[in-house]
Amino acid sequence: MVRTALTPWERSRGEHFGALIRRARGDRSMVDVAAAAGVSAETLRKIETGRAPTPAFFTVAALAATLGLSLDELAEAAALAAGAETEGGGAARSA
């Protein structure tokens, strides 16, 4: 299966999403947060660094629950940050 290349906006959204997750993790270890969410530390590392810009829904939901984040607020913040960077502050696109 060939995966469609991500747009610059999608890449930016993934990078911002990862940064949001990293900030929410605070000083908790990556291993501890990943274990609590039921994902591998490598998966969390890829998300936080933007190397996995489109993580699976259940991965995102588990991380959000573990970190006490709202899925709605998390999605909006990542999309708005990416939109502001790549579209000159324009409105965010729907995912």
Image (cartoon, rainbow, N blue to C red):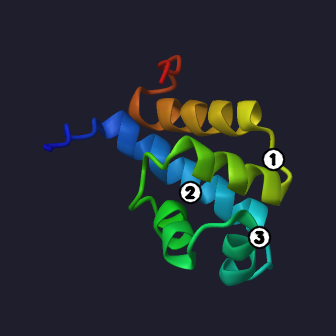
First along the sequence among labels 2 and 3? 2
Using residue 72 as the reference point, say whether residue 49 is left or right of it: left
The residue mark sitting in front, 1 or 3, is: 3
Q: Label 1 vs label 3: CA separation?
A: 14 Å
Asked if the residue under mark 3 is in contact with the one under mark 1, i.e. CB atoms within 8 Å, the reply is: no
**Residue that mark 2 sits on:** 18
Is the residue under label 3 in contact with that under label 2 (CB below 8 Å)?
no
Q: Nearer the viewer, mark 1 or mark 2?
A: 1
Residue 19, located in which quarter of the rendered image? Answer: bottom right
Image position, residue 91 (x, y; %): 53, 17
Q: Residue at x 73, y 30 (%)?
A: 72
Q: Looking at the rendered structure, which numbered label has been put on residue 69? A: 1
Give the residue furthest to the right.
68
Of mark 1 and mark 3, the one earlier in the sequence is 3
Q: Secondary structure at mark 3?
A: helix
Q: Is residue 87 above or below residue 53?
A: above
- Residue at the image point whose x is 50% and y is 46% from the top: 56
Neighbor class of circle 1 (other Cα within 10 Å; few <14, some 14-19, many 20+) is: some
Q: Which residue is the site of mark 3?
A: 36
For this rendering, which residue is in front, 62 or 82?
A: 62
Residue 1 image point, x, y percent: 15, 44
Q: Amino acid at mark 3?
A: Ala
Q: CA distance from mark 1 to mark 2?
A: 13 Å
Q: In the image, what residue occupies the spot 80% across and 51% down? A: 65
68 over 25 or under it: above or below: above
Q: Residue at x 56, y 74 (%)?
A: 40
Q: Amino acid at mark 2?
A: Gly
Q: Nearer the viewer, residue 43 or 14?
A: 43
Q: Quadrant of residue 26?
A: bottom right
Q: Secondary structure at mark 1?
A: loop
Amino acid tagged 1: Leu
